[in-house]
Amino acid sequence: MTHVRIAVSTESKARPQALFALLLDGATWPQWSMFDSFRLERPGKNDKLGVGAIRVFSKWTTQSREEIVEIIPGRKLSYVLLSGLPLRNYRADVVLTPRSDDGTAIDWTASFDCRAGTGWFWRLFMRWTLSTVAAQLAKAA
């Protein structure tokens, strides 16, 4: 197994609360992101969209099932991949930091394990995916 860690950053003119609302509500993702569809497989423990929620995002013939594992309202959303890609121990953290100009810094990090010899591919693919979605989020709000 190869361990991979990715970090992408971008900035938005929107405030953290506006970005967080889009990030948290998976039903909005098909409107602003590369994903074609969304389904809430299981609501969260204390909040429909909160910790414990399982979200399914689809693109072409691929589905990714993710569980929200940590939320700091307006600031941070963390999730783990349950299925959909041949990656193990996948965890991503999206951190929104207010800037002095009322905008927001978006930092999206992910780490995962993959089969030896495939790390280069998954590093490139996931960096592209996270960079694209982070830029789409920044623009949408």
Image: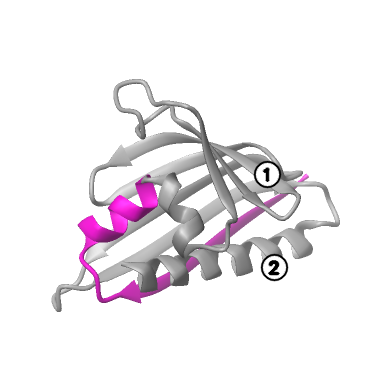
* Quadrant position of the N terminus in the picture: top right
| Position in image of residue 117 (x %, y %) | 86, 56
**Which residue is under mark 2?**
124
Question: Which residue is located at x 70 percent, y 41 percent?
Answer: 84
Numbered disc 2: secondary structure: helix
| Position in image of residue 116 (x %, y %) | 83, 51
Question: Which residue is located at x 31 percent, y 74 percent?
Answer: 12
**Which residue is under mark 1?**
63
- Residues rendered magenta in the picture: 1-24
Image quarter of residue 127:
bottom right
Question: Which residue is located at x 75 percent, y 47 percent?
Answer: 114
Question: Which residue is located at x 13 percent, y 75 percent?
Answer: 100
Of badges 1 and 2, nearer the viewer stands 1
First in sequence: mark 1 vs mark 2: 1
Which is nearer the eye, 7 or 75? 75
User: Is 43 colored magenta in this rendering?
Assistant: no
